[in-house]
Amino acid sequence: MCVGGRVEMSAVSRLCTLLLISACFTLTSAEHYSIDDQAGLGRVFDGIGGLSGGGATSRLLINYAEPYRTQILDYLFKPNFGASLHILKVEIGGDAQSTDGTEPSHMHYEDDENYFRGYEWWLMTEAKKRNPNITLIGLPWAFPGWIGRGVNWPYDFPDVTVSYIVSWIIGAKQYHDLDIDYVGIWNERNFDIKYIKLLRYTLDKAGLERVRIIASDNLWEPITLSVLGDEELREAVDVLGAHYPGTTSVPAAVKMGKQLWASEDYSTFNDEVGGGCWARILNQNYVNGLMSATISWNLVASYYQNLPFGRDGLMTAQEPWSGNYVVESPIWTTAHTTQFSQPGWKYLQTVGHLTHGGSYVALTDQKGNLTIVIETMVSNGSFTLDLDVDEVYTVTTIPTGLKGSYPEPPPSSPFPKTYKDDFNVKNPSFSEAPDFADQTGVFEYFMNLTDPGPHVYTLRQVVTQRPITWVADADQTVSVIGDYSWQNMTVSCDVFMEKENSGGVFVAARLDKGGGSVRNARGIFFWVLADGTYRVTSDLSGLSVLAEGLSGTRANTWNTLTLTVKGNFVSGELNGYLLWKNTVDLVPKNGWAAIGTSSFELAQFDNFAVQAE
């Protein structure tokens, strides 16, 4: 019933024994909306989630000090507190650039397995601590090069790729006690039916029958038609998933009866406008497309803001050095659904659009509880019900919702102008050094047991073969750090080339691009090569040469590089001696500091330091 322009829900509990749920709301005298289950129930609600990965999007989160790291995690995962997410989807790292950075693989090489690389294991564990019922999903965006057996495609040898993916799922359980619920299959061009069937067979053979498959985790077609026409494939695929579906699915997918998911969505700047966009997506993905789960890319904007898609997360946590983070509008937009309904609830059939814009959905646990979420993200004019334009409203019988809060975090501050790291971490908790953001290649802590001297603990670039990736990775490996606004700085690092004759390493300043644009990065790059020469270039590719000459450097010896940039004046030192100096033009005026190698090759770095003005 409607009383005084507000929704009265007391009748719901009285009618639950009749399995009848009824409510209504009125926006104007001419707009009356009835919600009940007399027409039956709709699809099962599978939840709302966030995606860590598809480009190293949670990279900086792990470096936050306590209590701020715990607070951020609570806003994301703690039930009845913040976003209260039902789903966490993570990238199965592939040693390749996949939007905003590189995530390490659990198998850099075919005979290599390590289930403690990267931070996704840690993140899944923390999410599970807060919500033991959270759904966990893994999806590879890219693969180590060896998977392709010399071909830049991961599905020509499906047995190899299947073994690689299944090993990750087994490792999650064996080493972290994490049960992976779903695994996605995604690629840009097409998909391999043989691979999907073999994956299902191998999962079952390994005792992983509970792990379900999302396909194609990219587009509705051609997977939908293939599933319709192939009974074995239909049995293998549990969920049809699409990325950025625009709130619509395809009729064939709807008729099939399988669960439909927006398995990646949102990708919007997380201000008030972005929050409104997310609200519309959450409702209308079901109203328009019968999608029963929606997963945000990305979970938390915890990467350098000047990388592509800066601040596209549900919240922002990009300053571990200061402890500052920002709880953005999309967190509370999410809470309107997640805190008042749970996976396993069902949508009512009576969902739809508001006459003058916006939408409403209703969900029930079939035990007498009802939640109605109304969004007015399209201009509605005015309402007689106490609704306003650009708002989200939840009307529910659930009493446990809470807008959680913590004391204000520390104020925002720039990356420190003086920074040093000797990488002397004997038993590192995580494989990557704080604040370094790998853009191509993977830079990991390394314990050099053959070196009894001062360089026992180093940072090592470990990828030696071009990965299989949908992003145009650079031919050189590079990891960035610092403040994008830096102009004048001195960058120094001890370097060790492991590749004889053709090996090379660099330190850089004012690097101006990362992510999928990294191969076009410009800056000031000071290279030393294993053939005894040096080179100074204004581009990562090393083609625009500013200076060059003899250095006497070779592989398997340590050297110290120092690059100083002040205005247009640039100089470089090798082992404390001035090697070159130059006045340069047409170089970026600002950018990150960086380290890297001249190709996919083994090389080590130690005693990194930067002093910016």
Image: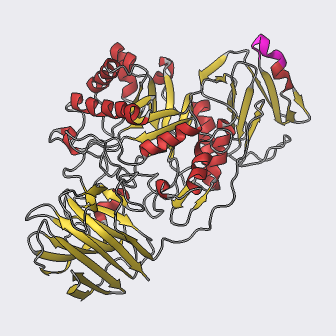
Nearer the observer, 129 or 154: 129
Nearer the observer, 71 or 506: 71
160 left or right of 137?
left
Residue placed at 52% from the left, 47% from the top?
A: 299
Residue 472: x and y in percent read: 28, 53
Is there any visible trace of residue 56 in the rendered image? yes
Residue 129: x and y in percent read: 55, 38
Residue placed at 34% from the left, 63% from the top?
A: 424
199 left or right of 412?
left
* Position of the C terminus by quadrant: bottom left
State which region is magenta: 14-20
Q: Residue furthest right?
A: 4
Residue 157: x and y in percent read: 20, 31
* Position of the N terminus by quadrant: top right
Residue placed at 34% from the left, 15% from the top?
A: 232
How are the colours assigned in the image? secondary structure
Residue placed at 74% from the left, 26% from the top?
A: 370
Q: Is residue 263 magenta?
A: no
Res 336 quadrant in image: top right
Is there any visible trace of residue 50 in the rendered image? no
